[in-house]
Image (spheres, coloured by chain):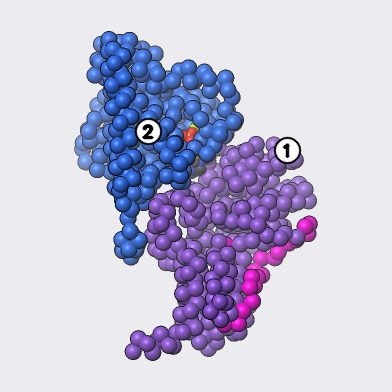
């Protein structure tokens, strides 16, 4: 499972590198709200596995400071929504440090947190906030969709030099998938084709991957062969993989759970139109959350974020763009 | 703790009955609410106020119309003590259109702005600056309103606590910060999150008049709050009150709370705030048992009626929600 893959990555890296440590709320004895850190206290002791008070600005800040001073912190923030309390430390400190020191100062800091909707936890516990971090030069943004990627990317995060926003999804912790043992490290900036296809490219990440795959299965029944492309890291972004796929399919759907306005999907669309305009046979479709906070009511929550059928409809539109235009005349 | 009211007279039957009614109403709401949760009628987070009823009960009885409260993620008790409609609260938990937030908010976001309830909050510590802000608005408007923020031991370690209390202090705001010290933040014991477990000392450190009270004694909480509120109305705020208490179960409905030592739990259950409010009413007012039974029955019926009301209510439609979103 996704959560076990994360634990394996932390465990192996803590074993390999004694400067790796983890702090967070309820992560030590209780093993974390999602059981990701279960057993680590027993194995590595209270010096390297620490509970904190509810002090996100402080936790993120001391993590950044420890990273500057040569340790390798993992700071677990229960919900990405609470990372907002630590934005100064992320945006003004961690992200800027390397440039401000002329390139010398590095901040090998990892913030692990989770976002997204998940069964009625309402507006302050359901957000997808990757665009906030994506916007800040100096922050890397990682959003694994499957257990193997979760492990490989987290291991890489703990071996490189710059701040990482490692954004998990609350819906994915219990999902299953094959995870290679041992030295399974995935470099940032390398996307993954989760399903090859030739008719339309669906670009998605995190919890939109299972939905994109389901959508692709439905499209296949209609004879539409969709390719599902998971960039895995939004910063750095695997532009080459995206452009290659677009050159093959000539049609693109980008699906994100986050609200549409100012989102990463819009930015990827702008890259594609600038660099592959003549490869496109149809306007790029963006499937995204409504521009509104997530409601408590379950039906409204569902309506606020993309569902499988929204992706299916968008993919169809890219293929029938012309006939739709004709029908409208 | 003193059984006297703050002006030195014995407490009136009216006051004692009010305290008992409120505490009992919260108890019923939470115990019955948990049953609804277990039946699958309520989803998401549900943080019961069981064991802490004495605090909201005593504090809100000392406030008047026009005052403000701000609450926490464990907010049902504050709403009820503030006089909220049980119908609208239950409807909100059942995500119905007739709920306080029309089903958009849920347990952690029930608010009633028009009535001065700034709302529960999903972000630990957020209610303190919001409450100080309400007190600031009252000062700017020149009203005599007092604002109470209910906050927690957990929130006392968050930057918002000191930053905003200090603002209230330098501006002499009519603000009472009630720190509900239930000694846990989820499973983290207070001893693990601070060296100084007497949280009222935080206020003293920045020149804020600060007190400690037994949070399971609603009458003592009432008396202390009444004094604090009067001082605030005279321009002598802010004031911090630390109310010591203990949860009767885990952090939320699905937390078995195994980390809570049985002897500590038993100690606090022996000092159950609802039982104490009932005993105070019985002993000091001469009320007879049949009257108590009638009160309890009335409150139970009110809750049952609220469930019926909520079940019969509709939900906001998706079309309506989309319209809301288009204008957001
Ligand atoms: C800023 C923030 N951090 C973390 C959380 C997650 N969380 C919700 S309640 C809670 C524990 C709260 O303990 P305390 O503040 O003492 O209040 P209590 O639950 O005891 O009433 C935590 C950590 C949150 N909601 N907001
Ligand atoms: Mg607490």
Query: Could you tell me which chain the residue with mark 2 belongs to?
Result: B
Left or right for A160, reference B258: right
Question: In the rendering, at what x and y percent does residue A138 appear?
Answer: 58, 62
Q: Nearer the viewer, residue A73 or B277?
A: B277
Compared to residue B45, the image places residue A287 above or below, namely: below
Compared to residue A205, the image places residue A165 above or below, namely: above
Q: Which of A327 and B83 is in front in this view?
A: A327
Query: Does residue B40 belong to the magenta stretch?
Result: no
What residue is disc 2 on?
B29
Mark 2 or mark 1: which is in front? 2
Question: Which residue is depicted at the point 49% across and 71% down?
Answer: A311
Dividing the picture into quadrants, the one containing residue A238 is: bottom right
Query: Magenta residues?
Result: A181-206
Question: In the rendering, at what x and y percent does residue A274 appear?
Answer: 51, 82
**What is the drawing colour of chain A?**
purple
Please, what secondary structure does the residue beneath circle 1 have? helix
All told, the count of numbered labels is 2
Question: In the rendering, at what x and y percent does residue A204 appear?
Answer: 55, 69
Residue A42 marker: 1
Compared to residue A34, the image places residue A143 above or below, namely: below
Query: Does residue A185 belong to the magenta stretch?
Result: yes
Q: Say whether residue B175 is visible.
A: no
Please, what secondary structure does the residue beneath circle 2 have? helix
The chain that appears blue in the image is B
Compared to residue A57, the image places residue A127 above or below, namely: below
In which quadrant will I find the C terminus of chain A?
Answer: bottom left
């Amino acid at each position: 499972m996704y959560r076990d893959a994360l634990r394996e990555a932390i465990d192996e890296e803590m074993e390999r590198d004694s400067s790796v440590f983890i702090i967070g709320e309820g992560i030590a004895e209780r093993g974390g709200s999602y059981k990701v850190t279960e057993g680590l206290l027993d194995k590595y002791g209270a010096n390297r596995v620490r509970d904190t008070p509810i002090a996100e600005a402080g936790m993120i800040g001391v993590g950044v400071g420890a990273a500057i001073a040569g340790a390798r912190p993992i700071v677990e923030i229960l919900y990405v929504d609470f990372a907002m309390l630590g934005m100064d430390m992320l945006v003004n400190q961690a992200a800027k440090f390397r440039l401000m020191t002329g390139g010398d100062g590095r901040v090998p800091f990892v913030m692990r947190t989770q976002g997204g909707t998940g069964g009625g936890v309402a507006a302050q516990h359901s957000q997808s906030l990757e665009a906030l971090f994506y916007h800040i030069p100096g922050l890397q943004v990682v959003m694994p969709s499957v257990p193997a990627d979760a492990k490989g990317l987290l291991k890489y995060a703990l071996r490189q030099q710059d701040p990482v926003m490692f954004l998990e999804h609350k819906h994915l912790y219990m999902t299953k998938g094959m995870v290679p043992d041992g030295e399974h490290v995935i470099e940032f900036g390398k996307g993954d084709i989760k399903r090859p296809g030739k008719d339309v490219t669906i670009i998605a990440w995190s919890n939109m991957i299972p939905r994109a795959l389901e959508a692709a299965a439905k499209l296949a029944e209609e004879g539409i062969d969709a390719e599902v492309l998971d960039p895995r890291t939004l910063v750095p972004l695997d532009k080459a993989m995206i452009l290659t796929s677009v050159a093959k399919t000539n049609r693109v759907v980008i699906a994100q759970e986050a609200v549409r306005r100012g989102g990463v999907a819009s930015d990827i669309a702008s890259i594609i139109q600038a660099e592959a305009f003549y490869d496109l046979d149809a306007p790029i479709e963006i499937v995204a959350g409504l521009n509104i906070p997530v409601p408590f009511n379950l039906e409204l929550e569902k309506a606020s974020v993309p569902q499988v059928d929204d992706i299916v409809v968008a993919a169809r539109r890219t293929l029938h763009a012309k006939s739709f235009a004709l029908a409208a005349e | 703790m003193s059984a006297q009211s703050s002006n030195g007279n014995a407490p009136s039957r009216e006051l004692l009955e009010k305290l008992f009614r409120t505490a009992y109403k919260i108890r019923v709401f939470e115990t019955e609410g948990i049953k609804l949760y277990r039946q699958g009628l309520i989803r998401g987070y549900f943080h019961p106020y069981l064991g802490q009823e004495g605090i909201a009960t005593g504090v809100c009885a000392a406030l008047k119309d026009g005052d403000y409260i701000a609450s926490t993620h464990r907010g049902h008790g504050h709403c009820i003590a503030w006089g909220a409609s049980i119908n609208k609260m239950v409807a909100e938990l059942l995500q119905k259109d007739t709920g306080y937030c029309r089903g958009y908010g849920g347990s952690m976001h029930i608010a009633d702005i028009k009535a001065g309830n700034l709302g529960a909050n999903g972000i630990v510590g957020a209610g303190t600056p919001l409450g100080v802000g309400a007190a600031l608005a009252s000062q700017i408007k020149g009203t005599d309103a007092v604002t109470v923020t209910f906050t927690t031991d957990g929130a006392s370690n968050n930057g918002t606590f000191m930053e905003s209390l200090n603002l209230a202090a330098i501006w002499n705001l009519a603000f009472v910060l009630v720190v509900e010290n239930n000694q846990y933040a989820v499973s983290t014991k207070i001893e693990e999150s601070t060296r100084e477990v007497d949280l009222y000392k935080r206020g003293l450190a920045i020149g804020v008049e600060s007190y400690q009270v037994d949070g399971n004694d609603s009458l003592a909480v009432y008396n202390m709050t009444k004094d604090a509120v009067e001082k605030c109305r005279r321009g002598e705020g802010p004031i911090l009150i630390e109310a010591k208490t203990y949860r009767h179960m885990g952090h939320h409905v699905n937390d078995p709370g195994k980390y809570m030592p049985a002897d500590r739990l038993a100690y606090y259950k022996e000092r159950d705030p609802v039982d104490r409010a009932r005993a105070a009413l019985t002993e000091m007012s001469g009320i007879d048992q049949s009257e108590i039974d009638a009160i309890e029955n009335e409150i139970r019926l009110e809750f049952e009626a609220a469930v019926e009301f909520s079940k019969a209510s509709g939900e906001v439609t998706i079309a309506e929600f989309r319209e809301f979103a288009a204008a957001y």
